């Protein structure tokens, strides 16, 4: 079948080509799916979408009129897809439920360590031949209390890693995992208690109506003074303006994020020659105790291979009219 691959990155090509093995005609489109980009999928049976593509009802209707019957997501998240409209249009939708939870968990820990040990300013100093250690004091991870919000596959791996550091681990999830409770001494508590007791809080939950702005001004005030906050899940979990206020008041001691609520107009593109128009992220970037990466937590060879293989497997199942466990 003919497939339009939206939000395509060149680093995906070898993995997609290897997984496809010539079966489908892949049309690579290095722009996001939006109203103006719909015609690029003309005569395509399927589209493959990434996290910032617009699969809202009007877009799906336009794709459907052009003959698109299938949507395969190169992501675990699907909050950017109007599933009700897709069902109404009889468009099948499938995702990649778990491409590499290790990649995300390890990146979250990397943000923790980089912020704690001030690796970015330390590296810049050395490059300037400034070998002073003043202002670079961190803390031992051993003995610190880390709160994991969401103990799905990523949260479980985080518990394993942090247990290895000697951290005390609190968790919040509507479905407690007895395995990590027994293996890593994880203690499940209410979210407010987790906030009050944790030295580090990491978010590993999906974005939906219940979790939107899970971290807001009120919840930040319930956190331990000087807390480190990490978000490698979805930008909409966090009220960024409230985080900025928390950083200014020093209620938040450090903030690490691989995601941002308004990232679709910023991330994955080179804006180095432009004037930054987003005042919120511009203010956030002024803090030296903030570390932001451009939604790269997933970016490992293992994850890219798994994403490509599952994406092509989904397309094969669609073409062969086979049911899928990861169909939405």
Image (cartoon, helix red, strand yellow):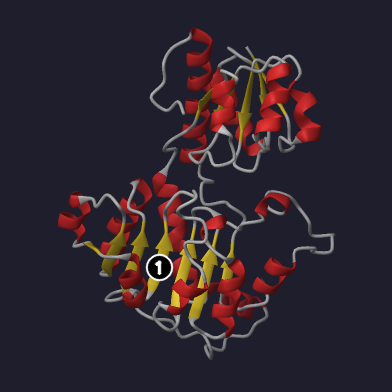
* Position of residue 104 measured from the top left corner of the image (x, y, whole percent): 45, 51
Q: Is residue 293 above or below residue 14?
A: below
Mark 1 falls on what kind of element? strand
Q: Quadrant of residue 257?
A: bottom right
Q: Nearer the viewer, residue 255 or 306?
A: 255
* Residue 116 visible from this viewpoint: no
Q: Is residue 302 above or below residue 269?
A: above
* Position of residue 264 measured from the top left corner of the image (x, y, whole percent): 68, 49
**Residue at which label 1 appears:** 201
Q: Is residue 280 above or below residue 52?
A: below
Residue sitting at x 49%, y 50%: 209
Q: Nearer the viewer, residue 80 or 253?
A: 80
Numbered label tally: 1
Label 1 packing within 10 angstroms: few (<14), some (14-19), many (20+)? many
Say whether residue 41 is left or right of residue 245: right
* Residue 4 visible from this viewpoint: yes
Residue sitting at x 41%, y 77%: 223
Q: Quadrant of residue 172?
A: bottom left
Residue sitting at x 34%, y 48%: 152
Residue sitting at x 49%, y 48%: 208
* Position of residue 48 measured from the top left corner of the image (x, y, whole percent): 61, 28
* Position of residue 305 measured from the top left corner of the image (x, y, whole percent): 49, 33
Outermost residue to the top: 320
Question: Can you say which quadrant of the picture contains the N terminus?
Answer: top right
């Amino acid at each position: 079948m003919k497939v339009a691959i939206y939000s395509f990155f060149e680093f995906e090509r070898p993995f997609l080509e290897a997984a496809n093995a010539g079966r489908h005609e892949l049309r690579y489109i290095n722009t996001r799916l939006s109203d103006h980009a719909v015609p690029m999928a003309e005569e395509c049976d399927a589209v493959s979408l990434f996290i910032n593509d617009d699969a809202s009802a009007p877009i799906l209707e336009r794709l459907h009129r052009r003959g698109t019957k299938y949507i395969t997501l190169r992501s675990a998240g699907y909050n950017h897809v109007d599933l009700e409209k897709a069902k109404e249009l009889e468009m099948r939708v499938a995702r990649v439920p778990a491409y590499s939870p290790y990649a995300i968990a390890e990146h979250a820990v990397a943000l923790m360590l980089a912020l704690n040990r001030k690796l970015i300013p330390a590296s810049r100093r050395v490059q300037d031949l400034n070998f002073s250690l003043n202002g670079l004091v961190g803390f031992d991870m051993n003995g610190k209390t880390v709160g994991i919000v969401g103990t799905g596959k990523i949260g479980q791996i985080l518990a394993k890693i942090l247990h290895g550091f000697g951290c005390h681990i609190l968790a919040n999830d509507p479905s407690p995992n007895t395995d990590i409770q027994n293996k890593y001494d994880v203690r499940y508590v209410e979210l407010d208690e987790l906030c009050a007791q944790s030295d580090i809080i990491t978010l590993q939950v999906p974005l939906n109506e219940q979790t939107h702005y899970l971290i807001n001004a009120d919840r930040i005030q319930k956190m331990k003074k000087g807390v480190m906050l990490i978000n490698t899940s979805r930008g909409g979990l966090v009220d960024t303006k409230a985080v900025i206020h928390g950083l200014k008041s020093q209620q938040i001691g450090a903030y690490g994020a691989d995601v941002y609520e308004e990232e679709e107009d910023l991330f994955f593109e080179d804006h180095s020659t432009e004037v930054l128009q987003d005042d919120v992220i511009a203010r956030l970037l002024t803090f030296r105790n903030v570390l932001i990466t451009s939604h790269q937590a997933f970016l490992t060879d293992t994850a890219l291979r798994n994403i490509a293989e599952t994406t092509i497997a989904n397309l094969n199942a669609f073409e062969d009219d086979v049911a899928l466990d990861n169909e939405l």
